[in-house]
Amino acid sequence: MLARVTVALCALLGAIAVPSEAQIVSGSLTEWQPVTLDFAGPSASELGATNPFLNWRLNVTFTNTSTGKSYVAPGYFDGDGNGGGTGNLWRTRFTPDEPGQWTYTASFRSGTNVAVDLSPTAGTADGLIDGKGGAFVVGDRDPCAPGFFKWGRLEYDATGTAASKHYLKFRDGGYWIKGGADSPENLLAFRDFDNTPNWNHQYYYHLGDWHDGDPTWTGGNGGRGLLGAFNYLSSQHVNSVYFLPMNIGGDGKDTWPFAGSVDRFGAASNDNIHYDISKLRQWDIVFQHAQKQGILLHFVLNEAETANKMELDNGELGVERKLFYREMIARFGYSNALQWNISEEYNLNFNLGETRVKQFAQYIQDVDPYDHPITVHNAGTPSVALEPFIGDIRFSLTSIQDAGADGLGSQVEYFRQRSETKGRPIPVMIDEPESLHLVTRDEVRKRMLWDIYLSGGGVEWIDASKDKSLENFRDYEPIWQDTWYARKFMEDNLPFWEMNPADSLLTGESSTYGGGEVFAKTGQVYAIYLPQATSTGSLDLRGLTGGFLLRWYNPRTGEFEGPETILAGGQLAALGAVPSGASEDWAALITAEVPEPTTLALMALAWTALAARRRRGR
């Protein structure tokens, strides 16, 4: 009851904007929920000759007065504040990560290209906003808040163990296993977004998934298809979506954030320095709905095609690219679960190369106050293409393309070990395995899904045949279900962030699809996946005492089945027969549940007596 009253009071405070020296502070004023700070500044237009995106720069320093923690959050020109491109409203969004009193001080500078200059003293102070400040009080986090607003920022586990650093972690929550959607890459080529003339998506099949109370625009109808799609994906426990915010000159040629004239095939004359305020406002509505639905935003900032890579500054880190990064960070970086991907297939066609990719990552890291994870996607042999970035502090996870369906677990294990060797263990994500249109549901499960998960990685699924045309995410419902069953097995039963791949502990199992996968915290818990269970093999428990409880899990139903059995330590312990369907795939959960030898002996005697009675027909 108290929690509900607190939430209601916070909502009321959010609805009643708090004025302070001509600024307006709004939001729920709750830890991990966004605070919006609005300033009345110089009047401008999104297509004005004096470019408000480039020739003014708003940065706001937020400081917690109790702990001294401080962030410099970039702001942006927001027209009239309601989607209109002309006005005098300048806005910063900030997500506080601690309760208590926060102060803020604005830096507002003017000058040629000042927005992309990292020097605090670049340009000239503009007294309309510069130096303005105030304070607000943030309440404790709401553990019942929707989606990611209850757990806080999803981030690299810098203080964790070598094993735990292979998973992203919510600051006030648990570790995270990716099970996401990689298609369609042109997710934002949506009919309902303003200034999207070459749209390819309506998401018609998801209109019925939109719910009363969900956001919308344009008279109550705008956005329903895509918002409904996020509702559906959330209902299937999909927790990540991959998309391009700018694909000029790429495959789709249908998505960009710019307000000016654009040749969608790519051209040096394109206006890439004026931004479409109404469109970006609509994007933000969708993105924040995704956050409430527990879906990470995977921003892929370049596409593989040469024209796309060269669209901004002819492929270099110049004014256009810096402004593009800054606008994405300023407008959407306050999201709790977000990652930046420098480029799809960075080394294909026009090769961005190691130096450029690192320069791009450094600039993003310099501007992003929240230090969201940064990655880059490869073409070709992953161990070669991604080697320059393993161990580099600017990169917090992988984004691996491996066009095959087999050996993905080995890729995960390689990069886990390689990143440890280089002194910076990172999460390993397979973001583009074999296309779903080339494999069956069973093959996805038996050759890819469990192999990746029980090697300690994460995955996003791609259908290359619908990478620009996918309209109905229900087409892949069996894949979403199987992915959730595997994630649920791990999240509900395993301290997976403390476990490591240990395939060598299992011997004698069926070799179909490469044999079994083992993920272990030695002596305490083991997870085993068998693509085929005709021969289940033996688990090496030598050197261990006590007993271990074995339970069989059906990856096709997401349920445990059959009786529990006891394995004795100190031996190569045979797993025995699966409950049914030995030609199918099964997972085993083995835990040190019976530590006392006396208890083990008594249970063994009981099982023997029960078996004897059954043989006598009693």
Image (cartoon, rainbow, N blue to C red):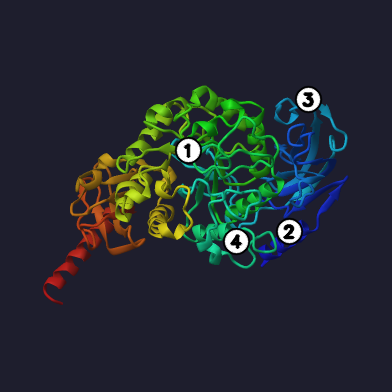
Q: Is residue 166 left or right of residue 286?
A: left
Disc 3/disc 4 C-alpha distance (Å):
44 Å
Q: Which of marks 1 and 4 is nearer the N terminus?
A: 1
Residue 138 place in picture, x, y as percent: 73, 50
Dot 2 crowding, Cα within 10 Å, few <14, some 14–19, many 20+: some
Q: Is residue 618 left or right of residue 127?
A: left
Residue at the spot of label 1: 165
Could you give the CA–CA distance between mark 1 and mark 2, rounded to whole angstroms?
Answer: 35 Å
Q: Nearer the viewer, mark 1 or mark 3?
A: 3
Q: Name the residue under label 2.
A: 10
Q: How crowded is mark 4: few (under 14 residues within 10 Å), some or many (20 or more)?
A: many
Q: Which residue was labeled with disc 3?
A: 121
Q: Which mark is residue 305?
A: none
The amino acid at mark 1 is Lys
Image quadrant containing the C terminus: bottom left
Along the polypeptide, which appears first: circle 1 or circle 2?
A: 2
